[in-house]
């Protein structure tokens, strides 16, 4: 029996090796230079510097020992330095108004799950920005793939969409990396529903470093926290010093109202930066709708994550909410109509809510042409 089994295994091994060799030999030869060239074709690489006046200088007044003292709060000029490369097909309603990309473009369709054409589209953009005296870095990178053309039947394997995205928004204080893959059910040529999985890598949102400093009565032991961070307090002489030994306050009121808020902000940022990013696996369902004519158009999409895997880790977001599950979602809407040859109006916007953090923008207006 053992000899028979040995012979069978040898035969199977021979067949499998032959099959593998056959499959390898039958694979088409891939010209990676040609593939790379095709994916760069019609892409635009751009860089731009934009600047302008920030908020005006503000005069301040204070009285010390009966003497009036004047000050001036100056805010440096705003600027943005943008570098990027993009290859994204424009939808019918989009108009390339500018000759050049100047880095100030805000295309709502970049947030859509599905692109205009089949295949790969991508955007890689980084912005170094100063706005109202605050410096930060914004980044938006994504690669999305849509495959649903030339395919009959709702269960066609080509009804598929995937997107890899990295977002860093300084003003919204949100940063994450997301990968999603979905099956799309096309109800008709305009409307499709999708379901799949999303995987997000981000800092442990919901974690509050100040919780460990709360007293039983709910108050915060902020002075002791400041001392642990290197500050010193001399109540007798009314001297409050920072870790470098510099006097930062001469009264309890200034210490409490001015210095402590900065101490808490610095401590919170330091503790958050010490933590490693965690990955969140979620179920995602969504829809996308696109219908266009020269007189009216509607493009809408939405995504909902109703269930999230709890890995039981110390910093899982499940630990910071009352319910075991929560809803994360995003949506976008672009609607325009040319009512007649004179009048037209539009509504455009997008909204995101992840881990109870919101960021959004919108615009709407009316155009009336006089002739």
Image (tube, rainbow, N blue to C red):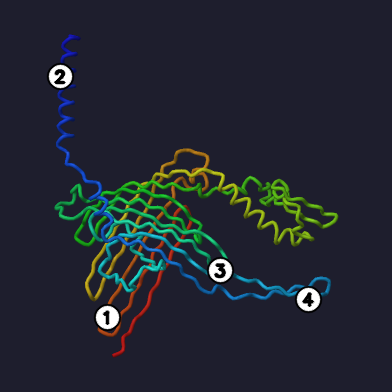
Q: Quadrant of the C terminus?
A: bottom left
Q: Quadrant of the N terminus?
A: top left
The residue closer to the viewer here, 21 or 206, is 21
Mark 1 or mark 3: name the one nearer the start of the chain: 3
Q: Is residue 100 above or below residue 224?
A: below
**Spatial separation of the CA atoms under disc 4 and disc 1:** 62 Å
In-image side of 234 versus 243 (left or right): right
Mark 4 or mark 2: name the one nearer the start of the chain: 2
Q: Which of the two discs, 1 and 2, sits closer to the camera? A: 2
**Residue 131 drawn at (x, y percent):** 53, 67
Q: Which of the two discs, 1 and 3, sits closer to the camera? A: 3
Mark 4 or mark 1: name the one nearer the start of the chain: 4
The residue that disc 2 covers is 11
Q: Which mark is residue 68?
A: 4
Mark 3 is surrounded, within 10 Å at the Cα level, by few (under 14), some (14 to 19) or many (20 or more) other residues, namely: some
The residue closer to the viewer here, 122 or 219, is 122
Q: Is residue 92 above or below residue 122?
A: below
Q: Which mark is residue 266?
A: none
Mark 3 or mark 4: name the one nearer the start of the chain: 4
**Residue 184 drawn at (x, y percent):** 25, 52
The residue that disc 3 covers is 132
Mark 4 is surrounded, within 10 Å at the Cα level, by few (under 14), some (14 to 19) or many (20 or more) other residues, namely: few
**Residue 157 drawn at (x, y percent):** 20, 47
Residue at 47% across, 43% down: 278
In-image side of 209 versus 286 (left or right): right
CB contact under 8 Å: marks 4 and 1? no
Badge 1 marks a residue whose secondary structure is: loop
The residue that disc 1 covers is 339
CB contact under 8 Å: marks 2 and 3? no
The residue closer to the viewer here, 305 or 165, is 165
Badge 3 marks a residue whose secondary structure is: loop
């Amino acid at each position: 029996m053992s000899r028979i089994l040995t012979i069978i295994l040898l035969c199977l091994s021979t067949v499998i090796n032959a099959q593998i060799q056959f499959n390898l030999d039958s694979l088409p030869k891939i010209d990676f230079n040609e593939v790379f060239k095709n994916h760069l074709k019609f892409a635009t690489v751009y860089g731009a510097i934009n600047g302008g006046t920030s908020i005006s200088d503000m005069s301040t007044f204070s009285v010390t020992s009966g003497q009036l003292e004047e000050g001036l709060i100056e805010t440096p000029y705003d600027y943005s330095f943008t570098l990027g490369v993009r290859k994204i097909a424009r939808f019918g309603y989009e108009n390339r108004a500018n000759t050049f990309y100047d880095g100030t473009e805000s295309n709502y369709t970049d947030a859509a799950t599905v692109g205009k054409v089949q295949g790969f589209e991508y955007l890689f953009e980084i912005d170094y920005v100063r706005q109202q005296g605050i410096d930060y870095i914004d980044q938006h990178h994504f690669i999305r793939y849509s495959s649903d053309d030339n395919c009959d039947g709702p269960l066609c394997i080509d009804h598929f969409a995937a997107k890899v995205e990295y977002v860093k928004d300084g003003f919204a204080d949100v940063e994450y990396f997301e990968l999603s893959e979905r099956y799309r059910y096309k109800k008709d040529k305009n409307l499709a529903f999708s379901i799949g999985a999303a995987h997000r890598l981000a800092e442990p949102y919901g974690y509050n470093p100040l919780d460990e400093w709360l007293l039983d009565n709910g108050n915060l032991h902020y002075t002791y926290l400041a001392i642990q961070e290197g500050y010193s307090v001399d109540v007798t002489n009314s001297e409050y010093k920072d870790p470098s030994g510099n006097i930062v306050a001469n009264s309890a009121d200034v210490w409490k109202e001015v210095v402590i808020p900065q101490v808490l902000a610095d401590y919170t940022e330091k503790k958050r930066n010490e933590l490693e990013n965690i990955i969140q696996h979620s179920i995602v369902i969504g829809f996308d709708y696109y219908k266009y004519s020269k007189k009216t158009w509607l493009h809408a999409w939405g995504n909902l994550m109703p269930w999230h895997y709890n890995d039981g880790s110390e910093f899982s977001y499940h630990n910071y909410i009352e319910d075991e599950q929560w809803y994360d979602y995003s949506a976008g809407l672009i609607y325009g109509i040319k009512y007649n040859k004179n009048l037209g109006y539009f509504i455009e916007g997008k909204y995101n809510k992840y881990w109870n953090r919101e960021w959004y923008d919108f615009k709407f207006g009316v155009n009336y042409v006089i002739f």
